Image: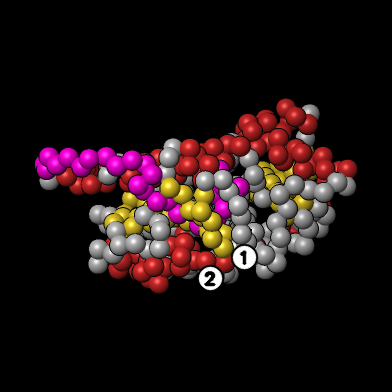
């Protein structure tokens, strides 16, 4: 079985090493060195060129290197074979670390102190207990739940919103369109950890910002197209929102002339909130390869109709 690896951010040599360590010698091809397309049965991918996978006549599995599969599903020629997403300890741990760091950054007023330093202002802001900061998680999936657990452990007041209702210890939960406004009304820091689907595209817009408490912070670690850029700029410039932390963008890399780069209340990182490390994630891929061979149900299969 030949495996085709396509990614411009993941290290193909590390992936080949980790897969071979578990499987023995493998036929591992790195795009654009395709070889005979008819020999490729598995595609291990992050954002492959649209149309490429349709050129593989014997493809049996598309295994994403990512949790989000919106880019794959946006390809109208995507072959009708099982599509699985990445659920992996390194991905979850890095996301939990990142969101916790950002929440603590705002909770401890480090954005205010950075501004004060630039103006040589010595003004102490007494730290508040974590429970005084209400953190809202949009998305209570694998990543949202792990983040919720860490934040409740640190003492934050946590609420979560999802498509279907979930019961999570220590978290006030809301669901569906009717639950959105009541959820938003109690979020001092809002974290978007949703998948990008037709239902969630553009969800971070003026209407949503207006439903947040005045002075709230918006953190987007989902996908860039969740956010309506001009609505965010307007809400920040009117003082409706305190700040935003953005890790994902509609166009990546973010173009150098984009206003987000220089906005004084926008903090940004280049899509690094979470990372899939082959040292652990190869276990997930190998498990699915063995299941594929055995005709067993695959893990983390995407429901294409639902879009995640
Ligand atoms: P997941 O396990 O599939 O969870 C998705 C969550 O979103 C579920 O709770 C789901 O609700 C909820 N949801 C989906 N559509 C919704 C809707 N229309 N309204 C309300 N809630 C909705 O996904 P995950 O593994 O946690 O990953 C989430 C996303 O994070 C990924 O899709 C990706 O875009 C993003 N991500 C970003 C990075 C980064 O580095 N920035 C890294 C990894 C992932 P139900 O529970 O009811 O189904
Ligand atoms: C990264 O953005 C992922 O979806 O894993």
Residue nearest the observer in this picture, 271 or 146: 146
Tell me the magenta residue range.
120-147
Which residue: 60% across, 52% down? 167
Q: Where is residue 29 in the image (x, y as percent from the top left)?
A: 71, 42
Which residue: 43% across, 47% down? 157
Question: Image quadrant of residue 233?
Answer: bottom left
Q: Mark 1 points at which residue?
A: 74
Query: As drawn, is 145 to the left or to the right of 29?
Result: left
- Report if the beta carbon of the residue with label 2 is closer than 8 angstroms to ligand 1: no
**Residue 157 appears in the figure:** yes
Does label 1 or label 2 sit earlier along the sequence? 1
Q: Mark 2 points at which residue?
A: 178
- Residue furthest right in the image: 294
* Mark 2: few/some/many CA within 10 Å (<14, 14-19, 20+): few
Quarter of the picture containing the C terminus is: bottom right
Q: Where is residue 12 in the image (x, y as percent from the top left)?
A: 62, 38
Name the secondary structure under disc 1.
loop
Query: As drawn, is 41 to the left or to the right of 6?
Result: right
Which residue: 75% across, 29% down? 22
């Amino acid at each position: 079985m030949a495996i085709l690896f396509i990614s411009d951010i993941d290290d193909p040599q590390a992936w080949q090493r980790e897969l071979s360590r578990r499987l023995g010698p493998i036929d591992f091809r790195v795009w654009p060195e395709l070889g005979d397309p008819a020999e490729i049965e598995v595609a291990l991918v992050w954002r492959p060129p649209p149309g490429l996978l349709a050129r593989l006549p014997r493809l049996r599995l598309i295994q994403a290197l990512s949790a989000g599969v919106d880019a794959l599903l946006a390809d109208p020629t995507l072959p009708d074979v099982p599509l699985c997403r990445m659920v992996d300890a390194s991905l979850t741990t890095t996301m939990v670390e990142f969101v916790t760091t950002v929440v603590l950054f705002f909770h401890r007023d480090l954005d205010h102190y950075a501004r004060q330093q630039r103006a040589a202002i010595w003004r102490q802001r007494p730290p508040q207990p974590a429970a005084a900061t209400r953190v809202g998680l949009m998305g209570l999936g694998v990543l949202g739940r792990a983040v919720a657990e860490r934040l409740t452990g640190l003492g934050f007041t946590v609420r979560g919103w999802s498509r279907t209702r979930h019961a999570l210890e220590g978290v006030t939960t809301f669901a569906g369109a009717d639950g959105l406004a009541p959820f938003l009304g109690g979020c001092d820091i809002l974290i978007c950890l949703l998948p990008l689907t037709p239902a969630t595209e553009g969800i971070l817009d003026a209407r949503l910002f207006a439903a947040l408490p005045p002075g709230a912070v918006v953190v987007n670690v989902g996908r860039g197209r969740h956010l309506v850029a001009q609505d965010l700029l307007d809400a920040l410039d009117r003082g409706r929102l305190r700040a935003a932390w953005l890790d994902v963008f509609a166009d990546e890399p973010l173009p150098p002339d984009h206003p987000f780069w220089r906005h004084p209340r926008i903090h940004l990182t280049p899509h690094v909130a979470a990372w899939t490390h082959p040292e652990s994630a190869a276990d997930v891929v190998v498990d699915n390869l063995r299941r594929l061979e055995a005709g067993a149900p695959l893990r983390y299969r995407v429901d294409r109709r639902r879009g995640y």
